[in-house]
Image: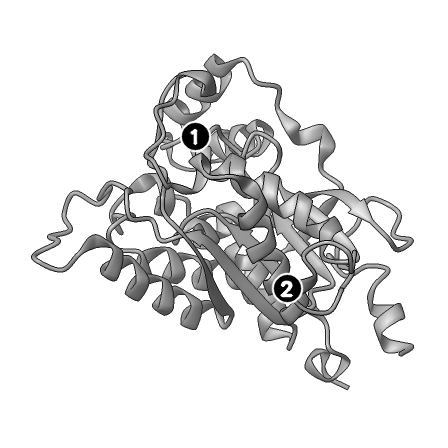
Amino acid sequence: MSEAERGLRLMAVHAHPDDESSKGAATLAKYAADGVRVLVVSCTGGERGDILNKSFKLGDEPLAEVRRREMAEAARILGVEHAWLGFEDSGYHEGPPDTWDLPSGSFAALDPQPETEALVALMRDFRPHVVITYDEEGGYPHPDHIRTHVISVAAFDAAADPDMFPGAGDAWQPLKLYYHGGFSLRRLEAIDEAMLAHNGTSPFKAWIDRMRATGRPDRSEKITTRIEVTDFLDVRDAALKAHATQIDPNDGHWFAIPHEVEAAVWGTDDYELVRSLVDSPAPEDDLFAGIRERVNAT
């Protein structure tokens, strides 16, 4: 019996198109290839994002339309389904959150209740067993990433409560909630050390220095779940490259690490299990640990 016949479902909630490809893409591709239904939710359209690939020429087409097309191609490459939550990008903001001047009507400036209701409606329709999102700092302090965390955690609980948002469909209880843990300082340091041993250079020094300078604690100790993804690194890279406005294919930040080096040093996508309604002792090597048995028994 395939995973599709068993009906396992995974929802990954992201802030912008391209986040799904830079955070856990190999995991999504792996589960999709195994027959699990995977739905990526993009909370915003990335309308206020910068063109980070300096070689990309936008032309006359609105950036929002280009990014929609890029997202469709990335979803095709990963083998996943995709849904837009329908809110506007808030743009990137430096400094403490209380100094941010958020655009009126943008995702992070709105009341989170209607945003939560929109996500609850998607959860009740798709009926995921597993939900992945960002930690309380958004992975890094982007207003849309933080708001994505807020509504994902709220929707995980509200989706199961028939008295919450009764017009958003029949109640459904997801069974596990995870935070991404891929950009841990420990992981970057390990790959940096391996690259220096491999060829004497590494693209990660500046990134590591920035992470250390923030003073934020490294969440490495919170990792509960490591998914082996070495067979899907090519798919991850192809999905990243589909976001041509954001990703320069010649950028060593993303693509300078030979896959054999990455696989030998850190061949997993890492996650923090923060909510579980099933028995699944850590450490885990499967996001559906404790769930497969329950779904198979029904």
| Spot occupied by residue 33 in the image (x, y as percentages of width and height) | 58, 74
* Amino acid of disc 2: Ala
- Residue 8, above or below 24: below
Can residue 269 be seen at all in this image of the molecule?
no
| Spot occupied by residue 148 in the image (x, y as percentages of width and height) | 54, 43
**Which quadrant is the C terminus positioned in?**
bottom right
| Spot occupied by residue 134 in the image (x, y as percentages of width and height) | 58, 41
Can residue 188 be seen at all in this image of the molecule?
yes
The image quadrant that residue 224 belongs to is top right
Of tags 2 and 1, which is closer to the observer? Answer: 2
Residue at the spot 56% in from the left edge and 66% down from the top edge: 39
* Amino acid of disc 1: Leu
| Spot occupied by residue 201 in the image (x, y as percentages of width and height) | 35, 31
Along the line of sight, the residue nearer the viewer: 172 or 187: 172
Residue at the spot 37% in from the left edge and 30% down from the top edge: 200
Q: Residues within 10 Å of mark 2 (few under 14, many from 20)?
A: some
The image quadrant that residue 102 belongs to is top left
Q: Which residue is mark 2?
A: 168
Question: What SS does tag 2 mark?
Answer: helix
Q: Which label was assigned to residue 159?
A: none
Residue at the spot 42% in from the left edge and 19% down from the top edge: 210
Gap in angstroms between the C-alphas marked 2 and 1:
52 Å
- Residue 193, above or below 294: above
Residue at the spot 31% in from the left edge and 62% down from the top edge: 68
- N-terminal of the pair, mark 2 or mark 1, is 2
Q: Which residue is mark 1?
A: 196
- Residue 186, above or below 293: above
Question: What SS does tag 1 mark?
Answer: helix
